[in-house]
Image (spheres, helix red, strand yellow):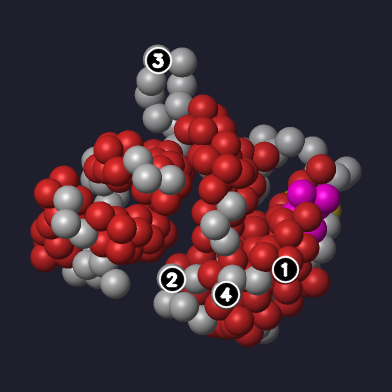
Amino acid sequence: MRGLGGVAVRDVGLVKQGDAVEQGGLAQVELPVQLGVAPGDYRGVIAAAQAGSEAAPNHGVAVQLAGQEAKAWARLGDRRQVEVALDKGRRLLEGMPHPENLDNHFVVDPAKFDFYSMDCYRLVGEDRLARTLADEVLRAGTDFDGTERSPMRNAEARVTLGVTAAREGDLEQALIHGERALQGDRQSVPSLIMTSRELAAVVRQRYRKEPTAQDYLNHLQELGREKPGFLPA
């Protein structure tokens, strides 16, 4: 069965093994580029996420779909619907046991839902909430010895801190966070590209004449030449 927004939902039947219910069919839910958020079909994402949630309302994938729905509403600028979708995801998450396998892409734990919420609040300009959640994402994604358990989440959290700092007039901190986010070998992940573009847009708008701002924008331009698709919009 093909849902809206390019999302295919196949074999949503559940397999009982004793008292355990396996999400055998749910593992076949396809989320191309996170439900199409990267290409920009946000209303298609919303429709697909809602259809997927209705097909599997009591399973972890529904929490992820609620998070993606909230992110799409945020990119459309609808603050009220963002809260509706996030509240739905929180209620679903609270009613589920803590997941055993956090490496499963379709599993959402509280830390991952904080990550979704962080994105949403950054997009709608709720900087205090976005900054608080970014700090929590970094705390949860880093071991006691400094090893990063969730490098991509951490990178996007740093971009979020950069965006909020730039909006508040602290260019130095904005660029520190922005450059730190670009370290590593997974720079071309679509979600990191999008968040880096958000920081670039704020820096370009507010600090265009600052030499350090130009250095950061030039770095993104270099990445754009090395990795097609990374050029800031």
In the displayed structure, does residue 226 sit left or right of residue 122? left
Point 45% across, 27% down: residue:
142
Q: Position of residue 138 (x, y in %)?
A: 48, 33
Residues at marks 4 and 1, CA–CA distance in whole angstroms: 10 Å
Residue that label 4 marks: 76
* Position of residue 220 measured from the top left corner of the image (x, y, whole percent): 19, 57
Residue highlighted by disc 3: 145
Q: Residue furthest top?
A: 145
Within 10 angstroms of label 2, few (less than 14), some, or many (20 or more) residues? Answer: some
Q: Are marks 4 and 1 in contact (CB under 8 Å)?
A: yes
Quadrant where the C terminus sits is bottom left
Report helix, strand or loop for mark 4.
loop
Q: Position of residue 86 (x, y in %)?
A: 72, 56
Give the residue type at disc 4. Leu
Judging by the rendered image, the residue that carries numbered circle 2 is 38
Tell whether label 4 touches label 2 (CB within 8 Å).
Answer: no
Secondary-structure class at tag 1: helix
State the residue position of label 1: 81
Tell which of 141 and 160 is nearer to you.
160
**Snapshot quadrant of residue 98:** top right
The earlier-in-sequence mark between 2 and 4 is 2
Dot 2 falls on a residue whose secondary structure is loop
Q: Earlier in the sequence, mark 1 or mark 2?
A: 2
Q: CA distance from mark 2 to mark 3?
A: 33 Å
For disc 1, the neighbor class at 10 Å (few under 14, some 14 to 19, many from 20) is some
Residue 56 relative to residue 169: left or right: right
Report the magenta residues as a range.
88-92
- For marks 3 and 4, give the CA distance: 39 Å
Residue 59 can be seen in this image: no
